Image (cartoon, rainbow, N blue to C red):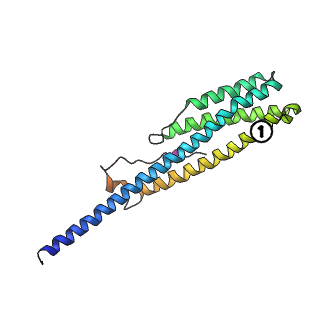
Amino acid sequence: MKKLMPWIVVLGVLAIIALWVANVYNGFVTAEEQVESAWAQVENQYQRRSDLVPNLVATVKGYASHESETLQGVIDARARATQITIDPANATPQQLAAYQKAQGELSQALGRLMAVAESYPDLKANENFRDLQQQLEGTENRIAVARQLFNDEAKKYNTSIRKFPNNETLLRGRRGFRESSESGVLN
């Protein structure tokens, strides 16, 4: 029994180390999935906004047909914003910046459209326009919340993979966890 005791201790220590490594790895997987899920919510809210744009443009077009430059600007900005897609697992700060730029251009175009709408009292009184405007405002709020959630999840994930003793150096070769694009945090 005395000869077995050192081996039992060694096996116990190895089992504890294996469980710790598995726990750290599973934590990284969970955190990475949370970042990807948070990014999907950001994209979902941007898509919701993009889906509202054609209805809004059509409603305004009926009242302000001579504002075709503004209307076309919104349509073009929407097209650019929907052309860019990002895979959160492989996103670079440059991709996030391009995505944010396109979404920002759409926000500016929508702002100009709303300014045009202010010049048309009949349009502002239109129930369909008011409903679309409220939906758009709600969507903008949802976008802000989804972006904040993504930023928070990316920060937690990045912190967990850089912290010792959980840092990636100890798990090198297990799986290629890499930092989420926190340097491209959504503003």
Is residue 105 shown to the viewer in this render? no
Helix, strand or loop status at disc 1: helix
Residue in the image at 59% along x and 31% along y: 82
Depth check, front residue: 15 or 69: 15
Residue in the image at 29% along x and 64% along y: 17
Task: Give the residue number, with chain letter if any, for mark 1.
Answer: 131
Please report the bounds of the magenta region as a residue range: 173-186
Residue at the far front in the pictured view: 127
Q: Amino acid at mark 1?
A: Asp
Left or right of 163? Residue 63 is: right
Depth check, front residue: 19 or 175: 19
Q: Is residue 158 above or below residue 74?
A: below
Quadrant showing the N terminus: bottom left
Marks counted in the figure total 1
Residue 62 in which image quadrant: top right
Residue 137 in which image quadrant: top right
Is residue 116 shown to the viewer in this render? yes
Q: Is residue 20 magenta?
A: no
Left or right of 169? Residue 77 is: right
- Residue 24 drawn at (x, y percent): 37, 58
Left or right of 139? Residue 168 is: left
Residue in the image at 41% along x and 54% along y: 28
- Residue 175 drawn at (x, y percent): 34, 48
Left or right of 39? Residue 6 is: left
- Residue 87 drawn at (x, y percent): 48, 38
- Residue 31 drawn at (x, y percent): 45, 53
Residue in the image at 39% along x and 48% along y: 177
